[in-house]
Image (cartoon, rainbow, N blue to C red):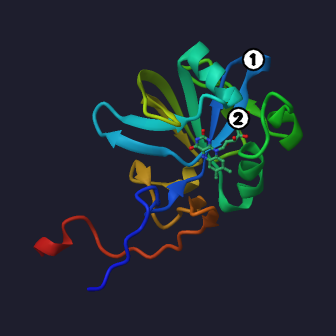
Amino acid sequence: MKKTTLSPKISTFPMPVAVVSVGTGEEANLITLGYVGKVCADPPIVVISMRPSRHSYQLIEKHGEFVINYPTIDQLKAADYCGTRSGRDVNKWKELNLTKEEATIVRVPMIKDFPWNMECKVINKIELGTHICYFGEVIATHSDPEYVKTNSLDPKQFNFPTYIAGNYLEIKSGILGKHGFSEE
Ligand SMILES: Cc1cc2nc3c(=O)[nH]c(=O)nc-3n(C[C@H](O)[C@H](O)[C@H](O)COP(=O)(O)O)c2cc1C
């Protein structure tokens, strides 16, 4: 197979479009992040990476907590807004008419209007280069019941946007097989 050699900086797979809440009370802010992923099953740990130049960086440093909120494809414009304006200049909650919902454990508010919210506590961080990587333990997950089947995300209902190479991408439901199907 003939191959083209590419920059090691290229991203291969789509990333999530996560709108992350940081800070509390009137200071609470929203930032869109693509660098988000699950890295441990038990305890459930996710990582998020943020540039220190972001307004949100001060707030995650101050409180050590964050909430990952996933928008639907219909809510993508709000997610793009949160990723192109700074909380230094605008109140993104007010501008987008989003409602703060009290979280069950962390003090950072969740976005009531988004169907999937994960409360996280920072347990570690690594300064990698351009970005600071925060490890967060997920201590509570909340979902619109429409997305849930047998206590898990129903892949047939998945309609969250993803992000690759500067573009938003829809994942069309097309289940290829169940884990372990090669053993059958
Ligand atoms: C789709 C998308 C993904 C982004 N991913 C990240 C990311 O992973 N890390 C980061 O530091 N900034 C990321 N950004 C940029 C921030 O969201 C953006 O700079 C934002 O305006 C910062 O807001 P703040 O200053 O209120 O914290 C992303 C933006 C978009 C639109």
Which residue is more in the foreground, 102 or 69?
Answer: 69
Q: Nearer the viewer, residue 58 or 36?
A: 58
Q: Earlier in the sequence, mark 2 or mark 1?
A: 1
Residue, disc 2: 30
Task: Mark 2 and ligand 1: say if the CB distance to the nearest ligand atom is below 8 Å.
Answer: yes
Amino acid tagged 2: Leu
The residue under label 1 is which amino acid type?
Gly
Say left or right for 96 vs 135. right
Q: Residue furthest left?
A: 183
Contact between labelled residues 1 and 2, with CB atoms less than 8 Å apart: no
Q: Residues within 10 Å of mark 1 (few under 14, many from 20)?
A: few
Residue 174 place in picture, x, y as percent: 44, 76
Residue 93 placed where, x, y %? 81, 35
| Residue at the image point whose x is 63% and y is 61% from the top | 166
Task: Please state the quadrant of the image where ligand 1 appears.
Answer: top right
Image side of residue 113 versus residue 124, left or right: right
For the point 54% across and 22% down, the residue is 65
Please, which residue is most extreme toward the top here?
A: 62
| Cβ at disc 1 under 8 Å from ligand 1 | no
